[in-house]
């Protein structure tokens, strides 16, 4: 009887995580779509990045217009993408247990911009769909809550503020504990709140 319970438990876990056991779990398509998109964005090849997203991600803009907007945002924002760490895709299941043409793809992104010159670690989940025979990004979510981060990134540690590694960018950054407590130099303008 114990072995039947164990077998049923294993069967339940297998069904609950069925997409990982089906042949489609090995399909590299969803992950490759995110990798291609991220590398194109990092190299600022926005026309190439456009090939890996749906109309939902571009607000249905044509490639030239969307690429020009991305360039403007990157230029004005001083955006620099550092390390990219795309993880294994999680495929959805259809009601009949077969693989659905959709997946969630986690990515750890290290980037900086004019407001965040120290770089940050962002935990992202990309929604990827099969569209006209090609895997494309349909949505992106940045995770902030620890529980949600651990759901997609088990074992990863969220960096403490001021201790973000600038992966792909030089060095580690530490913000001094006494930041803002030093007295201003004589004749210096008072610090802004």
Image (spheres, grey):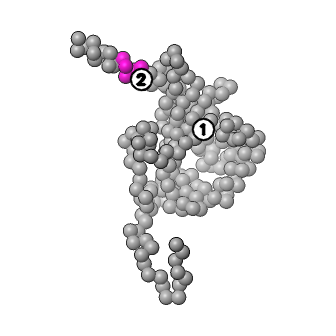
Residue shown at 67% from the left, 37% from the top: 56
Q: Nearer the viewer, residue 189 or 119?
A: 189
Q: Is residue 15 magenta?
A: yes
Q: Could you say whether the residue bearing mark 1 is in a helix, strand or loop? A: strand
Residue shown at 42% from the left, 78% from the top: 182
Percent position (x, y) of residue 53?
65, 37
Does residue 1 sit above or below 42 in this rendering?
above
Mark 1 is surrounded, within 10 Å at the Cα level, by few (under 14), some (14 to 19) or many (20 or more) other residues, namely some
Magenta residues, as a range?
A: 11-17
Percent position (x, y) of residue 188?
53, 84
Q: Nearer the viewer, residue 102 or 85?
A: 102
Residue shown at 57% from the left, 62% from the top: 115
Q: In which quadrant is the N terminus drawn?
A: top left
Label 2 or label 1, whichever comes before in sequence order:
2
Q: Is residue 140 magenta?
A: no
Mark 2 is surrounded, within 10 Å at the Cα level, by few (under 14), some (14 to 19) or many (20 or more) other residues, namely few
Q: Give the left or right position of residue 41, taking residue 16 as reference.
A: right
The numbered mark at residue 16 is 2
The numbered mark at residue 150 is none
Percent position (x, y) of residue 94?
53, 20
Most extreme residue toward the bottom is 186
Q: Could you say whether the residue bearing mark 2 is in a helix, strand or loop? A: helix
Does residue 11 sit above or below 66 in this rendering?
above
Quick check: can you spot residue 153? no
> For the residues marked 2 and 1, what is the alpha-carbon distance in whole angstroms?
24 Å
Percent position (x, y) of residue 68?
74, 50
Most extreme residue toward the front is 193
The numbered mark at residue 139 is 1
């Amino acid at each position: 009887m114990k072995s039947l319970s164990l077998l049923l438990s294993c069967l339940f876990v297998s069904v609950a995580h069925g997409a990982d056991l089906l042949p489609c779990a090995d399909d590299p398509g969803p992950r490759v779509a995110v990798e291609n998109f991220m590398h194109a964005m990092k190299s600022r090849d926005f026309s190439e990045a456009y090939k890996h997203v749906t109309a939902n991600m571009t607000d249905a803009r044509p490639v030239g217009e969307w690429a020009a907007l991305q360039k403007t945002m990157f230029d004005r924002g001083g955006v620099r993408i550092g390390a990219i760490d795309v993880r294994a895709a999680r495929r959805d299941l259809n009601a009949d247990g077969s693989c659905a043409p959709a997946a969630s793809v986690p990515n750890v992104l290290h980037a900086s911009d004019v407001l965040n010159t120290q770089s940050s670690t962002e935990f992202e989940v990309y929604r990827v769909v099969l569209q006209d025979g090609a895997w494309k990004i349909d949505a992106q979510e940045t995770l902030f809550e620890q529980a949600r981060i651990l759901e997609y990134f088990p074992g990863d540690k969220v960096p403490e503020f001021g201790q973000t590694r600038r992966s792909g960018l030089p060095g580690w950054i530490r913000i001094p504990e006494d930041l803002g407590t030093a007295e201003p130099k004589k004749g210096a303008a008072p610090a802004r709140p």
